[in-house]
Image (cartoon, helix red, strand yellow):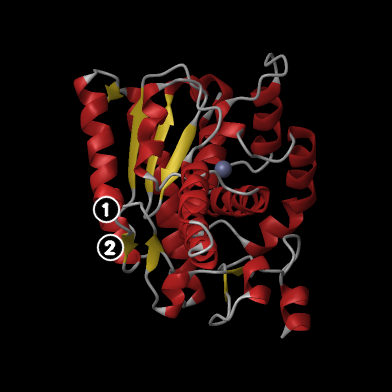
Amino acid sequence: MEARINRRSFVFGASCSLCGSMILPSCTQVPLTNRSQLNLYDSNLPIILMGGGVAGLPKIYPNEKALNQEVDKTYSRFLSKAKEDKILLDNTDESKKIEEIGKEIYTSLDTFYINKREKNPVENFNWQFALIESDTKNAWCMPGGKIAFYTGILPVCKNDDGIAAVMGHEIAHAFARHTVEKLTQASMMQMATIGISRSKYAELLNKSFRVGNVGGNVYNSVVKYGIFLPFSRKMESEADYLGMGFMNLAGFNIKEPAKLWQRMMAGQEGRVPEFMGSHPSPDNRSKKFLEWESEILDKFPQV
Ligand SMILES: [Zn+2]
């Protein structure tokens, strides 16, 4: 088993840190990268977050469908608030562009799976895209495919290929179910520590839900809903790889991500743009994109 995973899983390594230490059904694998991933839903177990619900009661997400329904509501609330504040860009050339590129990428992913005669693991996602007027250089994706771009990132994207690079990356986070993986880890950690000290446990919980350095932008306050967690470097790297693959499926130029990253860091004077929060260092990242090129062309041919 171990040897098979190692052979098939290229750069991300095959270890799943929680699997070794807990008695659990076996890890599943992220489609297309085969990285081992702990996902309670794949074992038909609910994700339980102590104190995450109303009046300090545990918050239970019984299955992925229920989680995504909740995310739907959160995303709608986010959009209504943005609309109220007149920063939701609707029906502008730029907002249409974002939607168009998002759609091109997810429909290409559909075609890719049809061509392979395999089931698309995210065929049930209801993809949605929004553009928000804000100087913040950011874009994000909630589970189930709810994506937002901030206008601040558009000059960095510079062209359609740059938008596709960021879009591919965000779609990849949803595709690889990174949020479910983070929630699973948080849930497992809580289960493991419960009973040791209730108060310490609550402290830990609070910490694990606070994303550092949100830049005081009110629209980052979506973090308070607890489904918007910082991803690990491994996840970021995986989203880079898959995102590059997805943009190639849709016929975008895969030379752009490396350039995008250089632009992202240019003129920042040491300040890390929001989008790069827990991302690997830009130099390292640009190098990776170059390394992956031939593999991407081979594994993710334009559909
Ligand atoms: Zn990311």
Q: Secondary structure at mark 2?
A: helix
**Ligand 1 closer than 8 Å to the CB at disc 2?**
no
**Quick check: can you spot residue 255?**
yes
Rendering coords of residue 24 (x, y %): 55, 80
Give the left or right position of residue 30, taking residue 270 as reference.
Answer: left
Rendering coords of residue 155 (x, y %): 53, 19
Give the left or right position of residue 36, taking residue 141 as reference.
Answer: right
Look at 39% across and 41% down and name the residue there. 147
Whether 4 is drawn above or below 142: the answer is below
| Viewer-proximal residue among 15 and 145 | 15
Look at 23% across and 40% down and name the residue there. 76
**Quick check: can you spot residue 124?**
no
Outermost residue toward the bottom in this view = 1
How far apart, in angstroms, are the residues tagged by discs 2 and 1?
A: 6 Å
Q: Quadrant of residue 19?
A: bottom right
Look at 35% across and 65% down and name the residue there. 64
**Ligand 1 closer than 8 Å to the CB at disc 1?**
no
Q: Which mark is residue 66?
A: 2
Which of the four quarters of the rendered structure image does ligand 1 lie in?
top right
**Which amino acid type is shown beneath numbered disc 1?**
Glu
Whether 23 is drawn above or below 226: the answer is below
Give the left or right position of residue 203, taking residue 22 as reference.
Answer: left
Q: Secondary structure at mark 1?
A: helix
Q: Residues within 10 Å of mark 1 (few under 14, many from 20)?
A: some
Q: Which residue is mark 1?
A: 70
Q: Residues within 10 Å of mark 2 (few under 14, many from 20)?
A: few
**Total count of labels:** 2
**Which amino acid type is shown beneath numbered disc 2?**
Ala
Disc 2 to disc 1: CB gap under 8 Å: yes
Rendering coords of residue 91 (x, y %): 25, 27
